[in-house]
Image: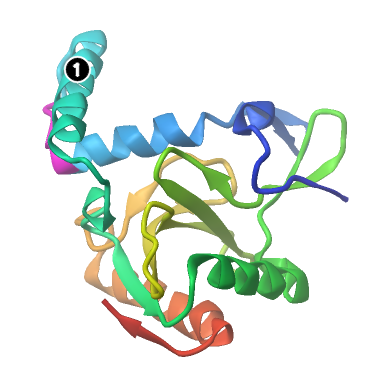
Amino acid sequence: MLKINEYTDTNILRKIVIKSTIFEVYSVSMETNFRKLRNQQSIPAFKDKLFAMFFGLVVGFSFLYSCINLNTDDYPWAEYYTFQCSRQALLSKINIFKERNPDYQLVVTLQSGQKVELKNTYTAHFCHIYFYLKNRNETLHCVMNISDTARTTQIGLEAVSKGIGFNRWREINTKKLTPKENQELKRIFENQILDQLGPWSRK
């Protein structure tokens, strides 16, 4: 199975075939930025999608201009957990956990038939980490602020998507999940994944 490391350009993963069906995997940065703007700025559903996108970009740039350093407030709805270790140490623990528990790896099939593990991907200020819940056929999206140089590290459980298609994301701690679903996903993440990485505490 071909593995892609954390510095691989996500653009090479745009076309993926699952069971002989081709679907687009959009750029992680564009997809996550769109969901950030949609949740934080509450952009109304304009009929003119181009105008809505333009308006969203204007709001986004205004926000970025007002913030010198991005922090966890970029995903304020996410559920954050703190580890008493460096970012690199936590990323190393996550990689080891996935190697020992391959069912949590997000594996897709390229058009060529190659099996590819989608590992950590990076945007300007965040590392994006994915965990596949095989028994539920769901993908968890987590974020880690790479601008933070503190000795402690926070990882945020940000959203869940059905399957591995990167579509229909539902953000944690929002109305897109029922209270029962929200608590269940956090419990699964804490018990099945975080507990295996070492001592942690909620933010």
Q: Is residue 148 above or below residue 196?
A: above
Q: Nearer the viewer, residue 122 or 89?
A: 89
> At 27% from the left edge and 41% from the top edge, which residue is drawn?
36
Snapshot quadrant of residue 49: top left
Residue drawn 67% across the image and 67% down it: 95
Residue 175 lies left or right of residue 28; in this view the side is left
Residue 86 position, x and y percent, is: 49, 72
Name the quadrant of the C terminus. bottom left
Residue with the mark numbered 1 = 52
Question: Within the image, what quadrant is residue 132 found in?
Answer: bottom right
Identity of the amino acid at label 1? Answer: Ala
Magenta stretch? 40-44
Q: Position of residue 151 (x, y in %)?
A: 41, 74
The foreground one among 120 and 193 is 120
* Residue 10 forms part of the magenta stretch: no
Q: Is residue 121 left or right of residue 36?
A: right
